[in-house]
Amino acid sequence: MEATVTQQLQFSPWIHSKSIAAKPKGSLHFSRRLEEQHMLQAPFSFNLQLSRRSSHHRTVALKISCSYKNSSVLESGNHRVSVDETLIIQRKSREIESYLNGRCIYFVGMMGSGKTTVGKVLSNALGYSFSDSDSLVEQDVGISVAEIFKVYGEDFFRERETEALRKLSLMNQFVISTGGGAVTRTINWKYMREGISVWLDVPLEALVKRISAVGTNSRPLLHNDSTDAYSKTLIRLSTLLEERGEAYANAEVRVSCEKIAAKLGTKDVSNVTPMAIAIEALEQIEIFLKREDGYCAF
């Protein structure tokens, strides 16, 4: 696995630009504390942009991109993730991996809650494979979920979704992102109980902002009227959350984005990174496993 972190630096000493450009690669050495955690060095490369302010003085803008071994994704979307978060998720993953015993992790939650994004972060950290049940249905039928709803109807899609979850229940070491409505069928819970189900609980307002910002064309249960995107999304998501709220609560693990935000000292859940959510998921999974018979050794 590889992670990327970008830092902008500016300096204006008496530096000959050619001597810098001649060495575009190198490595950053960390403190002994990081060495002990197998984080020995970080190869990096950089680009230079020179701006002449006078005939004798130049300002150099330096962009450094670092990567290091055995790390998880540091940047997702517009979020920047600290090195501390990366070290935490690595440690948590090592602590919990053997106790999972290869069991799959199923993310459930409303559309737009980040199941796919967080699922990929977690799968990378654990060394698991990642799968999306919607994508499996699309591969099986040969068209997008939105087109399936339009051509064949929701019942047809739900049957294919259940079949996808049945097949996944036979697998090991997978992190799985499920469709928002997967929780509405009892049979799906039977298959997900083969692993550990994790509910990504995101406030309604945050979901509405996310989905309305990118449009609803790919969301068949939302793309059905001509009102403005925000109003349409708010009304429909409110109804869906009311219908599915109790079903989501059946998950063995709940990850509350509001609680994560509070820990970070913010009220805005949009400031919570996928990495932070994945870390919280691991912590809550650990708590769940502690309560299970046979996991008293935690």
Image: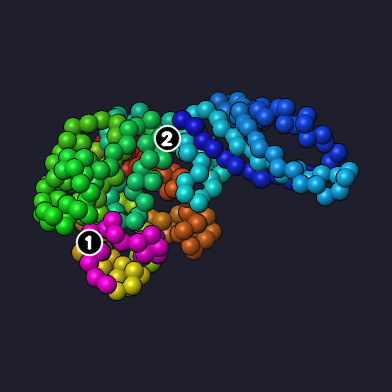
Report the amino acid beneath label 2. Ala
Report the amino acid beneath label 1. Leu
The location of residue 134, given as percent across then percent down, is 24, 46
* Residue 106 appearing in the image: no
In this orientation, which residue lies closer to the viewer: 208 or 298?
208
Residue at coordinates 23% horizontally, 59% vertically from top-left? 220
Which image quadrant is residue 41 in?
A: top right
The location of residue 159, given as percent across then percent down, is 11, 48
In this orientation, which residue lies closer to the viewer: 153 or 32?
153
Residue at coordinates 25% horizontally, 64% vertically from top-left? 223
In this orientation, which residue lies closer to the viewer: 31 or 274?
274
**Which stretch appears magenta?**
207-226
Residue 125 badge? 2
Query: Would you say residue 213 sits in the magenta stretch?
Result: yes
Residue position marked by numbered label 1 in the rendering:
221
In this rendering, the label closer to the viewer, 1 or 2? 1
